[in-house]
Structures are given as structure tokens and as C-alpha cells.
Amino acid sequence: MSRQPTIPLTPVSRRGLLGALVAGAGALAAASVQASIPAATGKSNESIDVLTPEEALAAYEAEIARLRAANINGTPVDLLERMRTDLLRALTKPVNERRWVMVIDLRACVGCHGCTIACVAENKLPPGVVYRPVLEEEIGRYPNVSRRFIPRPCMQCDNPPCTSVCPVSATYTNEHGVVAVDYEQCIGCRACIAACPYGARTFDFGYTYTANTTTSGVMFGAEQAVSYEQVSTFEYGKLHARHDAHDSPVGNVRKCHFCMHRVLNGELPACVTTCIGRATFFGDANDPESLVSELIAKPNVMRLKEELGTEPRVYYLQ
Amino acid sequence: MLKRLLYVVGSLGLLIGMWGLYDRFVYGHMNANYGSYVVWGLWVALYMFFAGVATGGFMLATLDLLFELPLFRGSGRMALWGSLVTLPAGLAAIGLDLGHMTRIWKVYLQPNFGAVMAQLVWGYTIFLIIIIVSLWLSFRPQPSRWLKPIMVVGLVLAIFLSGGIGALLGVNQNRVSWHVSNLPAQFPVFNLTSGVALMLIAIGWFGPVHDPRRSQQLHVLGLGLVVLLLVKGYYLWTDVSQALYQNSSHGAEAINLVLFGPYGWAFWLLQIGLGMLLPLIVLTTPIRNNGFAAGLMGVCVLLGLAVARANIIFPALSLPELRGLGEAFHGPHLSFTYSPSLMEWAVTAGIVGAATIGFVIGADRLPLFSRPVKSAGAAD
Ligand code: SF4
Ligand code: SF4
């Protein structure tokens, strides 16, 4: 890496941002789209490109310049914009100096399940596979009743009980601190599912929404739907087409991976961008300037089942 | 007559199993009822059961081939044969349970030895080789000096592999009812129990009727089984009482499911009634010296043990890790309730059928009891 980012983020207004968004999709979008489109047509298991630190720095500086230009009266930036610049700044650092975490504000989650569906769409999850369900909890008794919604991605535990039980090391913590599954290595024994205290892993049984279903023959537009279902995902930075009902990722265990294929291209995880309640945050906890660093220093922060010593990277604000 | 009946039952099982296998290979795991929450089902229970019988059978074989107890002289080969037919049955069950069976070679060539499952795959493979070699050596006309050392290694492996199955479950600290340190300690006792039950069947149903030691063998095995059943019952009591004492933990929920859940009847009727109480009664009365009754009690104990394997696995997995997980997202195989599908039962019938036929063929056609071929078994 040749240069460090030098421009601090200055708050801008939402109105200014809207204009800036139209005007300057810029280096960031170009870089990520360039990275993924050629790969989408390639053959399975090919790797996709990611931003280099230099590209990340250029994108970061362009973004900051755009936000500055859009800054009209100094009102705070939208949290999504802040997280995107945090993200780009993190990408300029060496991989081992980043610490990706997710923060979920339980008071802000409205239980729309939008993140669940965004994740399904992003990762083209088949029926029965879910990475981020939203758990619903009813608290109190009538007339003093309230509801709480708990989105539950993989916790990307720093001390994951799911990896040590894998007989073939198919699941492991990768260099980004994300617990990954190597689809080509996984034998589908499901020991890791049994070991996860959060129920964060599901098994791909080979279902499709349209192909080979009883109604696909009479369904209007079934062909397009089938081809959409077979388009590759970019999980773990690789192409995984789901063409064959007997080949990976069918027969494998699947889980949330913090959308690393997006993150490394300067994009926030799909669930973060879709959250209408601004209840999900993502970023580099090693960066004291980042939004997530601020949030996880709050006294109302907690992690699920902390007593197990799994050291989750997903924090909840309650 | 009995042998013929077993051949028929076994063949029927095999036939049903064919359909199950067809379904399994064409549709993969789609028609199974285990899922992403209850991840291990009937086949994993079957694997644990058969692996238990195999290790238990080997333990019993050492009475003859290692310790040379005069009472059991000549019974070692039969016990080894029992191990030889049940271990592949267990391995077939667990193999079919894998999402990618064809990648099993990875466990041999790219293993993570820190994982209990990898240790078990390697361990059981070595164990299978040991069974084959010791059986072969035991058939040699001249006694081999290698037999005893091999039996020693096999015995140690049998104990550790039995415990390993307990450890496979026990290492999961998130499953309170599994994560108890004595689970790996209990399994060798369970497996020894299955070994003794197997030998009761072998000697009671297929042993040489004119052997003067036969009734003595049945007597000792019967009493041994009584002791083991009492120890097993005591373990069960400690598990249940510890979990229910506060009646608040995940462990208590799992035990409550076992005792009073939808399959409570299987626990009370099959595991306790048929698998423990009936054999305890029969084996403490003179009826135990009757070959047929003794063998039947062996079958009952095995049946109880098979149900116990299921009762260790399913309830612990039927409890959501987080409240509301089962309702949060809907789709195929996302359920915390489990009952095996027809396909799972069919495959199970096939595996049990194959093991039964294999066992009976050995008893019927091979000189496993070192007796003249003409001296027919008690049951015929
Ligand atoms: S949440 Fe579960 S799957 Fe994710 S890292 Fe932790 S133990 Fe593994
Ligand atoms: S299912 Fe796959 S990733 Fe999970 S433990 Fe088994 S081999 Fe490893």
C-alpha cells in the first residue's frame, strides 16, 4: 500500500447527499461493478476481483470529496454514507489490521424482515437456506406488552465452536476474520451445525423455487426464473453456480459471511444497505473513527450467549 | 426355522432398502426429514448403535482370543463375525447421511485430526482392518503369535472408539444434555452391553446345542447383562435426576422431551420396558438357560439400546438454540420437530436387513464356533 487516507470525513446534509449520489457514483461503483460483471459470466469456482488498497484509497478520496461538495449546512451525514466511507478507509489498511464487526440496534429494528430477504436475494439462497432470520420475541403480559425483533446473522465468533469440529477443515476463520465454508471441501456431515450455539448454519438440501417443482411446467416465465436461480453467487469471492442438484453448494452447510464479496469491493453487506430502520451497522472496529467503534463502546451493548466464550463479532444495542 | 425366518426378514428389509437407496441417490437428502435444525436423524442413531455393537462384539471376542477363558473358548470368532457385519452397517448409515459421500476420501487425505469425527473415521477404519485381520488369524490352523497383540490393540481401540462417540456429542458445549463429561465414559459400558446382547443371540440361537458349556455360557452372559443393565439404568437415573433437579435448564427440557414428549412411549415401552425391565426379569430367572429365550432377550436389549441412541440425539437437537428460531423463517427442513421419513426408514430397513443376513450367513455357513458343520444350531 502506497498511501494512507488523509482526508477526514466532514458531516454533510441529506439533501446534499442526494444530489451527490446522482452525480458521483464514481470510482467506487465503477470499481465494484467492473469487478463482478466479468466474473458473473465465468465458470464456477472462479474468483472475483476485489478492490486493491490503491483503488480503495482513490474511491475513499472521491467519496470524501463528493460528500464535502455536497455539504451544505453541516448537518450529520446519513449513517449509510458514513459507514461506506468507514468501509473504504478500512480497505486501505492491511487485511490483518481490520476487524469487521456488525452492530444491531434492537430498539431500531422494526421487524420488517427486509434484511432476511436482501440476504436471500444477494446470495441467491434456495428454499430452506437462511443466513439472517429475524427472531421475534414478545415481552410482558397484556396490557403491558411489547415486541422485540432480533436479527441473527452468523456471529463470526472469534472463538468459533463450529470450526474445530469439522473433520476436513472445510470451515475456518479466514484472513478477514470471517468464518468461511469451502464448498468444494465440505463433506456435508453437519457437525458444525450441531456445534453452533446460535443456529446460524443451514444445510442446502437442493431445493429450488421453480426448477423441478411440480408447477414449473405451467408457470409463466418459468425459464427466466430457473435461469435466475442458477446464476452464480459471489460467496467467499468465488462463483458458485447452482446448476446441479447434486453438486456444491447443494449438500453443503451454508452460512452468513458478512457479504465479504461486497465488502472487499467497497460495498456494505446487503442486510445493512436494506435496513429501513437503520438498525444494522457494519465496519472496522479497529478504526477508532468508525461508527461501529463508537457504537460498541456504549453501555447498552451486549452479545448473545457471551457466557459460552465464543466472542461473537456481532454486537447488539438494547 | 428361526434361521429361515431371519433370512426372510433380512431379505424383506433389503428389498425395502433398495427403494430407499434409489430415493436417496436420485433425490439426495430431499426426502429425509432431518434438517437444518434437527441435523442428525435416524441414520446417525443407527451408526452409533451399530458401531456400538461392533466394538462391544470385539470386547467379547477378547474373552476367548485374548484372555482365553475356558468357558468362552471357541466363541471368539462368532463375536468377531458379529463385529465384522455390524461395523460396515454402521459406516454405511453414516456414509449415506453425508451431503457429499464421494468426498469421504478427504477425511483420509486431508483430515483435521482435532475434530472428533476425523478421529472416529480413522479409528473405525483401523478397527475394521483389525477385525478382519484378527478373524483371519483366528481361522489359521496354527495359532498365530500375532493374534494376541492385535486383540490388545483392538480392545484399546474398541474402548476409545466407544468413548469417541460420546465425545462426538459431548464436545458441543451448547447442547447441555450432551455436554456432560461422563457421556464419553458411559458409552463403553453401553457398547459392552450391546456386545453381550449380541453374544446371547449368537450362542442362544446359533450356538452348538451339544456343547456342555453352552448353558453355563448363557448363564454367565445373562448375569453379565443383568449387571450391565443395572449400571446402564443407574447412568440413566443420574442423567435424569441431575437434569430435572432444578427443572430449568436446557438439559431438563431435553429430558422432559424424552420422558413425556411425542416419543415418550418409545422411551417407556421400548427403551425401559422391552430393553431393560423384561430382560432383567427373564435373565434373573431360570428361563435364561433356554437358548431361544436368552437370544430373544439379547434382541430386546439391542432394540432398547437403539432407541436409547435415538433418545440421546433427537431431543437435544429439537430445542431451538435461540427462542423463536423455529418460527423466524419458514422453508423445507427448517423444523425443530423430527420423525424419520419413509425413505429414512426404508434405508434403515435395508441396512438392518443386510446386517441380519450377514450375521446369519456367518452362523449358518462358517465354522465360527469351531464345531462340525453338521451340528445344527439350537434354533433349527
Ligand atoms: S455463530 Fe455459529 S456459525 Fe457463526 S462463527 Fe459462531 S459458532 Fe460458527
Ligand atoms: S458440514 Fe462441512 S463444514 Fe460443516 S463440519 Fe461437516 S465438512 Fe465441515
Image (cartoon, coloured by chain):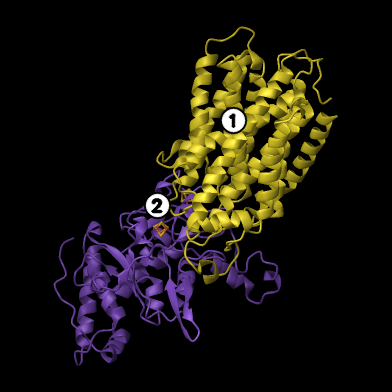
Chain colours: A purple, B yellow
Task: Tell me what residue is drawn at x 77 percent, y 12 percent.
Answer: B372
Mark 2 vs ligand 1: CB below 8 Å: yes
Residue to which mark 1 is pinned: B56
Q: Nearer the viewer, mark 1 or mark 2?
A: 1
Q: Quadrant of the N terminus of chain B?
A: top right
| Residue B202 visible in the current orientation | yes
Q: Helix, strand, or loop for circle 2?
A: helix
**Which residue is tagged 2?**
A161
Q: Mark 1 is on which residue type?
A: Gly
Q: What is the quadrant of the C terminus of chain B in the image?
A: top right
Residue A258 place in picture, x, y as percent:
37, 65
Identify the chain of the residue marked 2, using the numbered disc in the image: A
Residue at x-position 50% and y-position 28%:
B157
Q: Distance between the residues labelled 1 and 2?
A: 31 Å
Dot 2 amino acid type: Pro
Q: How crowded is mark 2: few (under 14 residues within 10 Å), some or many (20 or more)?
A: many
Vertical position of residue A314 compared to residue B227: above or below: below
Give B307 or A197, whichever is nearer the viewer.
B307
Which residue is drawn at the image coordinates 45% and 70% (left, top)? A119
